[in-house]
Image (cartoon, rainbow, N blue to C red):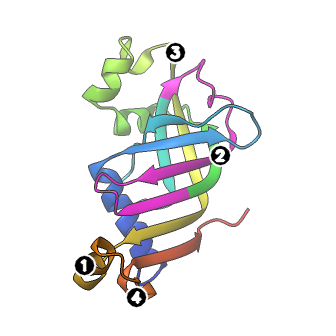
Amino acid sequence: MANDSTSIADFYKALKHSPFVMIGLDDTPDHAEPMTAQIEDGVHDTLWFFTSRDNRVAIGGGAMAQFSSKGHDFFACLHGTLSVNANPAMIDTLWSKQVESWFPGGKTDPNLLLMHFAIDSAEMWQADLSLTGMVKMMFGGKISPDEVGDHAKLTLHPA
């Protein structure tokens, strides 16, 4: 990854193709659960999630999300703060037919909750095995660091 902004851009590009992450709260014993991330164009430090008021993440707080791209060539671990956002304009902006299928009462469904995930830090890995690296891997050869891809640690909003 060339730099932090490239890393974030690559992450959001991969997320558009497969918007699913595992997210869990820091201060609970509950396991992470799969959720569909919603994104705002041009905003690279925030994820949004529609959920129900009785969902285990609805209490918010410190949270961690893990992502694996559809092609299994990009991985991310994100840490930040999950909080409720009751702004009807944001619900309108992010609303889709897929979200509507989960909330039959529509945008005013009493069980609907929009969660805002402000990303504080992230660690990302992009696997980009070179042709030489792939051949070595198939035959058990030693793969050098420059043949495996990139890794980046980012701080977006320090806690």
Name which of mark 2 and mark 4 comes first in the sequence: 2
Q: Which residue is mark 1?
A: 135
Name which of mark 3 and mark 4 comes first in the sequence: 3
Identify which amino acid the numbered label 2 is placed on.
Answer: Ala
Q: Kindly give the residue lying farthest to the right in the view shown.
A: 27
Residue in the image at 36% along x and 38% along y? 94
- Answer whether labels 1 and 4 touch (C-beta < 8 Å): no
Image quadrant where one finds the N terminus: bottom left
Q: Quadrant of residue 59?
A: top right
Q: Is residue 113 above or below residue 129?
A: above
Q: Is residue 59 magenta?
A: yes
Q: Which residue is mark 3?
A: 111
Q: Nearer the viewer, residue 36 or 95?
A: 36
Tell which tag, 3 or 4, sits nearer the viewer.
4
Identify which amino acid the numbered label 3 is placed on.
Answer: Asn
Q: Which mark is residue 63?
A: 2
Q: Nearer the viewer, residue 148 or 151?
A: 148
Q: Which mark is residue 115?
A: none
Q: CA distance from mark 1 to mark 4?
A: 14 Å
Crowd class of label 1 (few under 14; some 14 to 19; many from 20; radius 10 Å) = few
